[in-house]
Amino acid sequence: MTSLRGRAVIGGILWAAVTILLGFAGLQSFVDQGAEERFDELLLTRLSQVVTAVENVAATNPEAIAGAVGDPVFMRSMSGLYWQVENDSGQVFRSASLDDHVLPRPRLLVDAAPNDRFLGPMGDPVRAMSRYLTLDGGSLWHVQVAKSIRGLQQELAQLREIMLTAFTFVIVIGVVGALLQVTVALRPIEKLRRDVQQRWTSEGGLDHGKYPEEVAPLVYDIDTLLTRNREIVQQSRKQAADLGHAIKTPAAIMRNELDALARAGQPVGEAIAALDRLDAQLKRAFGRMRAQTGIAALPAVTEMDRSLGRMVCAFGDMAAQRNLTLTADYPPGQRLRMDPTDLEEVLGNLLDNALKWASTAIRLTAIPQACGVTITIEDDGPGIPPDQIALAMGSGQRLDIAKPGTGLGLSITADLLQAHGSALLLDQSADLGGLRARFRLQSVQAQG
Amino acid sequence: MRILLVEDEPVLAQQINTVLVTEGYAVDIADDGIAAEALGVSQPYDTILLDMGLPGRDGMQVLKNWRAAGMRAPVLILSARDGWTERVDGLDAGADDYLIKPFHMPELSARLRAMIRRKSEQASPVFERDDVVFDSRINQVMVAGQGISLTAQEMAVLSYLFHHAGRLVSRTELSQHIYHHDGARESNTIAVFINRLRKKLGDSLIDTVRGRGYMIKAPE
C-alpha cells in the first residue's frame, strides 16, 4: 500500500471496528447475564411461594395447594408460569395454567438450583426450578415451578437491537472521525507538496516555521536540498559560460591565424576542419549541459508574451533586413512552465532556422489549450522531406551545406524541450508550404 | 572610417586590428570597459566592435551607458556568449548586430561594412558617380573601367565622402574619421588628399565649398 491516507484510514477503521465489536460483545454478555439473573430471582421467588403453600397445606389437604399459592397468573390457562407438585405416593398436583400438561421431571435433583430448560405446554422454551422438601409427617414432596423464557428472549432481542443501532451509530461517527482526523493530520503534507510545487516557479524558499513540529525538520531539509540544488545548477551554468568564454576566444585567435595562413596559400585545410569539429563539439556539449540542467532546480516560469515579444522584435529586424516578413500572433497573460532562457534558446534556434530558409514569410503563433500552450513557427521555404525529418533532428546533421550553421540548432532545441517534458514536432506547413516546427508547454496558473 | 575595437584579449585584438587597418579603417583599441566607455562617448566613431566579457565594466553595461548618454554609433557585439537570450539582451540594449566567437574574419568585415552602410543609408556596397566606381567590399576604385591605385588615406577620405554623399563634410570631420586616436591629425593634410583624389579620379567627383568642406553629390 503506498497511500499514507489509505493506510491511516483503513488502520483506523479496523482498530475502531475491533474495539467496537469487542465492546458490543462484552456489553451484550453483561446485559444477557443480568437479565437471566433477574429472571432466575423471580423464578426462585415463585418457587418459594409454591413451597410455602405446600408446607402450609399439603400435609392436610393437598388439593388446597392451588388456593394456597393464590397467584392469578397460575390460574390463567397457558399463562407461561406453571407449578407442579408431586409427593412420594405419586400424586401430582399442578397449576391451572398447565391445563392437562405435565412438566417433565428435572434431570438434576439439586436442591433449589435453577436446573433445566425444556419445552413447555405451548411448545415454548421454559426454565424450571424445583426443590424436594420433607413435611412434618415424613412425606417427601417435589415442588417445581417453570416459566416461559420467550418474554426474556424478546426483551434481550429488543435490547440487542437497541445496542446494535447505538453501536452502528458509533461506528459511523468513528469512521467519519477517522477520516477527519486523517485529513487534518495530513494537511501539512499536502501543504508541503503545494509549497514545493510553487517553489519550482518562484525564487522564494519554504518557511518551515509554518509547519507542525513533527514536519518542520523535513520541510527544512527539503528546502536546504532545493536551495543547494539550485545553487549547483546556477554554478554549473556559470562555469559552463566561463569555460565557453575561455575556450572560444583562443579558438577565435586560432581560426584567424589559420584563415590568414589559408589566404597565404598554406595547406591548413585539415587544421581548419579540426577547429570546425572542435567548435561543433563545444556547442553540442554546452547545449547538452544546458538541457541537462534546464529543469533541475531553477525557477521555471516564463511570461510568454515577454519572451515571445523580445524574440519577435529582434528577429523582426533581422527579417526586415533580409526582405522577409515575420508575423506573430499570441495571447497575453500566459505563464509557461519553462526557464525563460531555455524558451528563448528554443525560439531563437527555430526562428534563426526559419530566417535561413524562408522565401518571403515567417509566422509565429501561440495557441492556448487545456493546461498548455502550443507554439508554432512556420515558414514558406523548401521545408524538410518527411523521410529526412529524423535526420534533421540528429546532432550535427546539415541537410544543405549551402546555408551557414553547425546543424546543431534543431538537435539542441529538441534536447531542451525534452528536458522540459515537451517534444519538437516537425512537418510541413499547411498554407505556407515550408517547415512547421511545433511544441507544447505546460501552463502555470497565475498566483494571487 | 574610424572604428573603436573593445577587446581585452590582446592577441585577438591585434588580429582584428591588422585586418581592419588593411581594409582602410582607423582603429582605436580599448582593453577594458571603463576606457571603452570613455572613448565611446568622447570620440566620433563610425562603428564600434564590443566584446561582452571585459575587465573593469561588463560590455553590456558599457553599451547601456553609451546609449543612455546618447552615443549613436552602430555597435557590433563580439561575444563568446552564444545563447539567444544574451544575443537579444544585447540587441535590446542598443547593439546593431551580434557576432559569436569564434568567427571568420571575412564575416566580421562584411557585417562591419553593412552596419556602416545602414548608418549612412546606403543600400549598395558599390558606389557609382559618373564614370567613377568605388567597391567598398574590396576597396577598389575604377575610372572608366580602369583600376586606380589609391593610398590608404586617400581611400579612407573617398570612402567617407561616398558614405556621406549629398552632405557637406568639413575638414575637421574628415580628419576625425580617417585618423585613429593617437594618429597625427592635421586638417591641412586633408586638402592634400583631396587634391590627389581629384588628380586620380577627375575634378568633377568632389565639390569644394570654400571654407566649409567637401561633398560628393548624392546619386540621382
Image: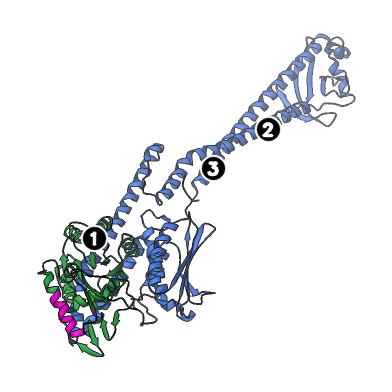
Query: Which amino acid type is marked by label 3?
Result: Val
What chain is colored blue? A
Quick check: A100 left or right of A117? right
SS type, badge 1: helix
Q: Count neighbours of disc 1 (C-alpha within 10 A) and say few if under 14, some if 14 to 19, many if 20 or more.
A: many
Q: Is residue B36 above or below residue A75?
A: below
Q: Chain of mark 1?
A: B
Residue lying furthest left: B184
- Mark whose residue sits in front, 3 or 2: 3
At a point 78% along the width and 19% down the height, the residue shown is: A142
- Measured Cα–Cα span from mark 2 to mark 1: 83 Å
Q: Is residue B201 above or below residue A100?
A: below
Q: Which mark is residue A165?
A: 2
Q: Closest to the observer: A407 or A402?
A: A402
Is residue B56 a member of the stretch shown in magenta?
Answer: no
Mark 3 on the same chain as mark 2: yes
- Extent of the magenta region: B191-205
Q: Count neighbours of disc 2 (C-alpha within 10 A) and say few if under 14, some if 14 to 19, many if 20 or more.
A: few
State the hue of chain B.
green
At a point 47% along the width and 81% down the height, the residue shown is: A385
Q: List x then y, in percent, for residue A297.
A: 36, 55
Q: Chain of mark 2?
A: A
Query: Which amino acid type is marked by label 1?
Result: Gly
Q: Which residue is mark 3?
A: A9
